[in-house]
Amino acid sequence: MTQAKKQNIDINHELWVLKGSRLKGLEEGVKGSLFALGNGYIGTRGTEEIRSENADSDEGTYLNGAFYREKITYGESAYGFATHNNKILRVADGKKIVFESQGELFSPDLLVIEKALDEALEPLAQLNLAEAVLSHQYLLQTASGKQLSVSTRRFVSQAEKNLMVVQYQLVALNFSGVIKIHTLLDVNFDSSEIDSNKSEDPREGVFSGRDFMQEHERYTASDLSYFIHEIIDPQSLVCVAAVCDSDSTLTFCAEEETLVKQNAQADQLKTTYQLELQQGVSSNIDKYLFYGNEFYGNEFHGSELNGSELNSSELNEKQNLDVEQVRNKLLEQARVLLNKCCQKGFSTLYSEHLALMQRFWQNSDITINNSPVDQIAIRLNLLHLHMSAGKDGHSNIAAKGLSGAGYDGHYFWDSEIYVMPLFIYTAPDVAKNLLMFRHNTLPQARTRARQLSIETGALFPWRTIGGEECSAFFLAGTAQYHINAAIGYAVRHYFEVTNDWNFMCEYGAELVFETARIWPEIGHFSETHGGLFCIDQVTGPDEYTALVNNNFYTNSMAQLHLEFAVKIAVSFQRICAKEFLRLCDKIKLDQKEIIQWQVISDKMYIPFDETRGINPQDDSFLDKKAWDFVNVPEDKYPLLLNFHPLVIYRHQVLKQADVVLAMNLLDNRVSKATKSANLDFYEPLTTHDSTLSACAHCIAYCEVGDYVTAFDYFEKTLLTDLQDLHHNSCYGVHTASMGGAWMCIVQGFAGLRVRDGELYFIPHLPLKYTQLKFRIQIRENRLEVVMNPSHTDYRLITGSELVLYDNGQRFKLDKIRRDACIQRNQIVG
């Protein structure tokens, strides 16, 4: 913590540390998710470095964007069904270590400690949220009674994309002498036992990679140890390499040196050292781990090599050459990085990592006064989002982040709607890179559109890693065409806040135009709806209602999407005429099509029931039988695990916010009276079986002024993982809910909206808190907002001028007036 204080983080240590002792009652799998670390590329679960021989392990280390393709088997298939699933790779675990003395292993199982009978004997674990450092403390013993204290610190470097660091501090408690240290690279890919125990929960992800990953090469020596594995489809290599250093004399055991190529069967690569310990004197061992993957050979997802017509022998020669080049590239990267680590040492690498963590917290931290649990929860959520978001333009953020293999590591629309706002307002470069992933997978989205008989534009997948559609359940997957609207909305939101015309000219406009093109193709002007434009056979966000006509969310978001596409086309043509013409030529877009977008937007059918004063979720929803909430027992929820989809589809019941989410995103297009009526109607019908639901309801209740109910939904969002409220955090954290917690505070309780480049706030501090503070960035301006019971303080930290509204009161911050205090007469709880 000393380093952080020097860099001006205002730290109350207790509010920045998540201790394992605070997580009593949570299963080990949940702790593994909560304590996970990552940097947007590497993610590793918060498991122990030293484990009991018989202990179950929910180990997992993952690389964002590294995956394998698995053919989907259908009992009955049809044209256009998704053909392959993408599954995130579980790569070698490099954290594990074993200590030995004279043929005896040091084990946590053998130690007898005088403790209270009800106190579990387990490693002491804590996650330092400010530093993104996980530490454990162990007390080990041999059968003959030698005792060894081991303290570990590990972090996934924020400064080096491919680096994870583990430091082991050893103290011999009752002996002096030489011990052996076995550091491991552990792949353990045989998941037959896991497969046999797989539950019916579709949210669970199972790694079964032995048929897809083959050992290509292994090597261990004093200066470098590594595993290289080959992925069959898509063709790629994964390299995990390690080197150890010490502040004492660490001797490599040469007899362990081996070089074995091609299909070795052992699941572990062991590198052994000797170290002499003096009783009571500490010695540090620093382990530096390189993780990297590269694609080669066949085109990213195709069976043809870049469309070439090479014969089989030429093809094999080309592929072998590519794999050798990739192998050499990865090993060179590993050697350079790990040599640099040994030269810099742990302290320097740690400081470089902390400097970037400091920058993150300066821009993104939220402080909550008067609630330590909520304070730690929001920081835990923010940290996981930061550690999980892809930052290279070729990866995104998975529904479970990099903390577990739930949902097979897939990216969903959660990224654009629930996670993107945090980064748009605090780290716009990260937001841009998440959008770049969508742009980089436009070719696959165009292919998918043609498979769905859409002749122009692109249809993005419901769930994916590499860009192809992975949803075998098309009713609640592919049918959710609103994924295109989510991407269009995210580009709109990013541009509205950043005014980044360079991005729009190069990438954003193409994304908006290509995604907008699906709406004329899948909809039509309906005579029975007064000539208005209707969209049939889609599924909205509510997955308990499938294949309906005129889903309110889909139609209204499509309308917003098309309006923005026309606006960007007009502005683009005026500001950058040459670039606009280049893009139009590239995607074969003409003025006739842009005019068509405007006509469709103007005539979009938006369902509204005059009698009830609400927006029907779709054409059929109001005619369905009501779900029997009174007589269906609690243990039958979530419904998706207990009822056939057809049973659910024929009832008035919602898994998650649908109309409610739409009216949040539509801002002031929906009147307050209609929002209130929609909430009154839909909230009692919503099971909230999805973690995407509570935050949408929190924001909606803020908008209609019911802050007590809003706060209840906020805490359900905020504590989703910390309290395992949905009983599945063992598969990984819920990134959408974590992003939703930020939205609840900033867009809910602070009421932030951006309209025409100006900021609108309607702040109401929850009664439980004495203060809320956060920072946001809009264009070149960085603003700090401090919500107090009687007033809200606004401070322009950087930038020259910003126009704001507080409850309709307009004021301006600039170079002369950088602070404003807006009083209010009433505290609303």
Image (spheres, grey):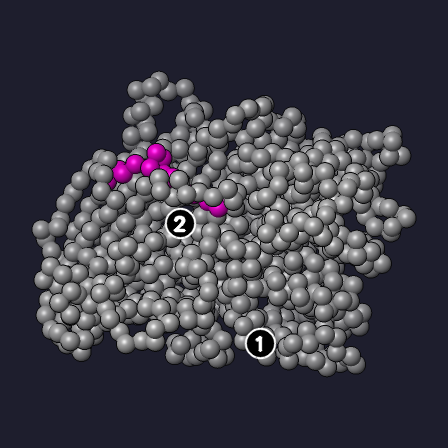
Location of the C terminus by quadrant is: bottom right
Residue, far front: 631
60 within the magenta span? no
Residues packed near mark 1 inside 10 Å, few (<14), some (14 to 19) or many (20 plus): some
- On residue 62, which mark appears? 2
Q: Helix, strand or loop at disc 2?
A: strand
Distance in Å between CA atoms under marks 2 and 1: 34 Å
Identify which residue is drawn at 15% across, 70% down: 146
Residue 514 in sight in this render: no
Question: Which kind of residue does numbered mark 1 sit on?
Answer: Ser
Residue 443 falls left or right of residue 158 = right
The answer to whether residue 818 is above or below residue 135 is below
Q: Report which quarter residue 38 is drawn in.
A: bottom left
Q: Relative to the observer, which residue lies in front, 556 or 684?
A: 684
Question: Which kind of residue does numbered mark 2 sit on?
Answer: Tyr
Q: Report which quarter residue 98 is drawn in.
A: bottom left
**Region rendered in magenta:** 204-217
Residues packed near mark 2 inside 10 Å, few (<14), some (14 to 19) or many (20 plus): many
